[in-house]
Image: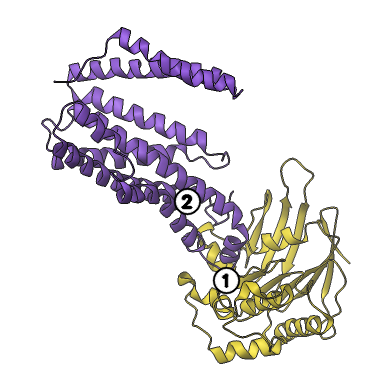
Chain colours: A purple, B yellow
Amino acid sequence: MNVEPISWWQLGLCMIFVIIAGTGSIMLKLRLEKDLAWGTVRTFAQLFLVGYVLKWVFAIDHPVPVLLLYVGMILAAALNIRGRIKQRQIPFFLPTFASMVVSYLLVTTLVTAVIIQVEPWYKPQYFIPLGGMIIGNAMNAITIGLERLFTDLRKRRAEIELMLSLGATYPEATEAILRDAVRAGMLPSINALMTVGLVSLPGMMTGQILAGSPPMTAVKYQIVVMLMIAAATAIGSIIVVHLVRRRCFTRAHQLRV
Amino acid sequence: MKLRLDKVTLRHGDAAPLLAEVNLSLDPGDFVLIEGPSGCGKSSLLRLLNRLQEPASGQLLVDGEAVIESATPAFRRRSAYLQQTPVMLDGSVRDNLLLPFRIASTRRSLPSDQTLRQWLDRFLLQAVKLEDVAPHLSVGQQQRLALIRLLLTEPELLLCDEPTSALDDDSRRIVLEALQQANLETGMAIVLVSHDGLVLDKVQPRRLRIVDGHLEEA
């Protein structure tokens, strides 16, 4: 390891950045000082907490704590999705959570076991950060997809009921809406494939380079990550949007929202 | 097809029921006119008969039996529902008229352009071309297109929510004539909802009113 360590004293020096941002907020009366202070405290607390958990999981080196942590991360992401979507009539939390667990475990394991061929496949140094990137990106994709689904179901209600009244089944009546929702969820990660490296250097690649990896190794890892994210957001959006759409209709093909 | 509403109650939230224990029997060849002020539950009654909505209590019986939930789409094809505000999807007049035929699960065979043309002409839509963009047409034109779209499917029961509200006198007369003719010639049962009295000269409709959530003979 040839990373320069950061001492507590150096970390404290970072408060300069908080003071700079805070002064700006006070001078322009943005009233963001409180949020900034609270955000800073949370950043320290959350990251140190994660740090200790990771240290503990790495030390045990057993699949159970790794998978528990992984499922915990998905739970946090699913709760975040529920909080961001303003829709209380349709219970979408459970199908979202369940399909995220199944599909992301699959993609992450595929990456560690088959593509990178880590020994053992659950090695937390690989499994957790790769899984984290999948979950984070897929969380956004699913949120966008579900938001679009709910908005369209409400906005295009007359159109859907026309199709239903003509004898269409609910999948037939919402074919276009489903497609739009899945597309909306997948687009950001596909757009990212187009601009990666041109607009900004991806975080993981930057991290690896900072940690002393040869740039080409970092680049290869980044490619794996980008493609893995594209697949994960696709699977996630498709499964979740399908399952949730099902719940927006009664068994007699009546719109619920 | 015999259709029956058996003690059907419908309410929105905690409000007083919009329809309270309503009974209604519809037989083939029936022509029913339902009147009442706007907001009295006329539209909801039609939605119940197309099963777009589920009652709070009571049930809808087809030939004496409740419709199995999964068979609802097939039931709706027999009991066609004309929405109060005509809905046209993006696309041409032809696309919109053929919409019921393009729903894969319905397996209906496509009518020819010539047939479509005849229907348009009959409803005083000579100026409308099959290639025209349907949502760009006037509400009155769309209202007639929506009705043609349903008549083409030859349903056993036709539920019309204010089918002439946006029409001038000539078009209104044509529409009412076509409905009466379909009723007399094919035995198509028709339920017509309207807030003002409609003049029917060929059939003797059953006239019903909704008063305080109850269905009464007018």
Give the SS element for disc 2.
helix
Where is residue A240 drawn, in percent x and y?
41, 46
* Mark 2 in CB contact with mark 1 (< 8 angstroms): no
Q: Is residue A213 above or below residue A65?
A: below
Please report the residue visible at 47 percent of the width from the left and 19 percent of the height from the top. Answer: A20
Q: Is residue A237 above or below residue B166?
A: above
Residue A36 visible in the picture: yes
Where is residue B103 drawn, in percent x and y?
49, 71
Please report the residue visible at 70 percent of the width from the left and 60 percent of the height from the top. Answer: B5
Amino acid at dot 1: Arg
Q: Which residue is mark 1?
A: B77
Q: Is residue A235 left or right of residue B107?
A: left
Q: Which residue is mark 2?
A: A246
Residue B66 visible in the picture: no
Other residues around mark 1 within 10 Å, as few (<14) / some (14–19) / many (≥20) = many
Where is residue B115 drawn, in percent x and y?
58, 90
Where is residue A255 drawn, in percent x and y?
58, 54
Amino acid at dot 2: Arg
Disc 2 or disc 1, which is closer to the eye? Answer: 2
Near-viewer residue (A196 or A50):
A196
Query: In the figure, residue A200 lies in which quadrant?
Result: top left
